[in-house]
Amino acid sequence: MNKIKIRHVDPKTKTQKGLFGDGCYGAVKCNDECCEYGCDVDLATLKLIEKHRKLIEPLIGAKIEDCFSTELKKDDDYIGGAYRETSVRKSDGRCAFHLREKRGCSLFQLWITKRLPKKIIPTICRIFPLTWHRGKLFIDTPIREFCKCREKTPRGERVPSLFDTQKKELRALFDILEE
């Protein structure tokens, strides 16, 4: 798999408190605020979504074809050189892949429960609230009010930076030339 090349890492990524504890998988108060945007899905992830459509469609109550607001767009800033944007449901204002009437993402759930490849989770979702654009890695600001990285840190617990708590995903997805 080709990686996205990063030439500059914003220093704020190394000072902003990270996703401590179980991160987004644990008990958080955010109500899936980040899912209000929808997301960009790279070509490799699109292929996995299509391959596992029979597992995904019942969780989201929609056909995969109806989950995107754009056709495939060529862009070297994405793994595979192309991406599509997901649609946001009018009924609840969440990404088309968000679970219906409960918290969480169908793609994350299938990775955890069915052990599907982690690549089924879009890059932006794997590193959120970090993002990238044209060789730069930075925090997607403003960070939403109830994001786990803004929660009060439990007494006596040291919390690494966003860069540090997301490092495993960053290394899997990006070729970071500056660290």
Image (cartoon, rainbow, N blue to C red):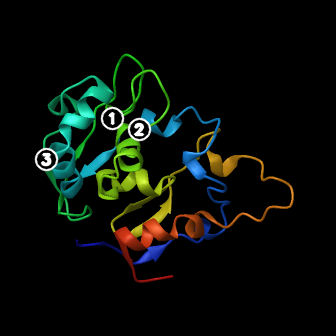
Instruction: Name the residue at 33% across, 51% down.
Output: 122
Q: What residue would you read off at disc 3?
A: 72
Position of residue 175 measured from the top left corner of the image (x, y, whole percent): 36, 77
- Disc 3 residue type? Leu
Position of residue 109 measured from the top left corner of the image (x, y, whole percent): 40, 42
The numbered mark, 2 or 1, whose residue comes first in the sequence reads 1
Position of residue 133 measured from the top left corner of the image (x, y, whole percent): 36, 62
The numbered mark, 3 or 1, whose residue comes first in the sequence reads 3
- Does the rendering let one see residue 142? no
Instruction: Name the residue at 62% across, 70% down.
Output: 14
Q: CA distance from mark 2 to mark 1?
A: 6 Å
The local secondary structure at tag 2 comes to: loop
Position of residue 141 measured from the top left corner of the image (x, y, whole percent): 54, 50
Q: Residues within 10 Å of mark 3 (few under 14, many from 20)?
A: some
Residue 68 sits in quarter: top left
- Say which of 61 and 15 sits in front: 61
The numbered mark, 3 or 2, whose residue comes first in the sequence reads 3
**Looking at the image, residue 126 lies above or below residue 166:** above
- Disc 2 residue type? Cys
* The furthest residue to the right: 155
CB contact under 8 Å: marks 2 and 1: yes
- Does the rendering let one see residue 123? yes
**Looking at the image, residue 100 lies above or below residue 68:** above
Q: CA distance from mark 3 to mark 2?
A: 22 Å
